[in-house]
Image: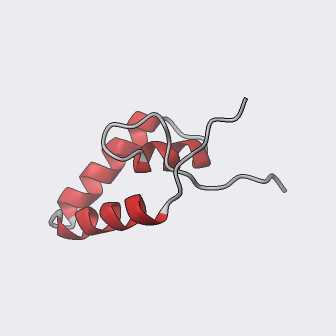
């Protein structure tokens, strides 16, 4: 089993949450961002905004390793 962890990405627009999820899943970052926005709009935007803020606080920032 691989040792992958969920981090906020350095490829960020707001907080790096969607990019971090995309990197963790191996998906395209744009696809995850679009799915997140559509899901938030469908759920009346309020829960999606709260979830994003919580993830922004809880997810650790990715460190650059050389």
Closest to the observer: 30 or 53? 53
Give the residue drawn at x 24%, y 59%.
Answer: 40
| In-image side of 61 versus 33 (left or right) | right
Residue at 51 percent of width and 46 percent of height: 20
Q: How many marks?
A: 0
- Name the one closer to the observer, 65 or 1: 65
- The answer to which quarter of the image holds residue 55 is bottom left
Q: Nearer the viewer, residue 19 or 60?
A: 60
Looking at this view, name the residue that lies furthest to the left.
Answer: 44
Residue 51 shown left or right of residue 11 in the figure: left
**Which quadrant: the N terminus?**
bottom right
Instruction: Give the percent coordinates (x, y) of residue 27.
Output: 54, 40
**Residue 29: percent from the left, percent from the top?**
45, 37
- Residue 61 position in % (x across, y down): 52, 50
Which residue is at a point 78% across and 54% down the rendered structure image?
3
Identify which residue, 40 or 59, lies in the foreground: 59
Look at the picture and state if 18 lies above or below 49: above
Image quadrant occupied by the C terminus: top right
* Way the structure is coloured: secondary structure
Query: Farthest residue in the right direction?
Result: 1
């Amino acid at each position: 089993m691989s040792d992958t962890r969920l981090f906020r990405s350095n490829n960020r627009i707001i907080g790096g949450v969607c990019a971090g999820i995309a990197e963790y899943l191996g998906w395209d970052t744009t696809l995850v961002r679009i799915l997140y926005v559509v899901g938030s709009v469908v759920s009346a935007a309020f829960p999606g905004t709260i979830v994003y803020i919580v993830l922004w606080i809880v997810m650790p920032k990715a460190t650059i390793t050389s």
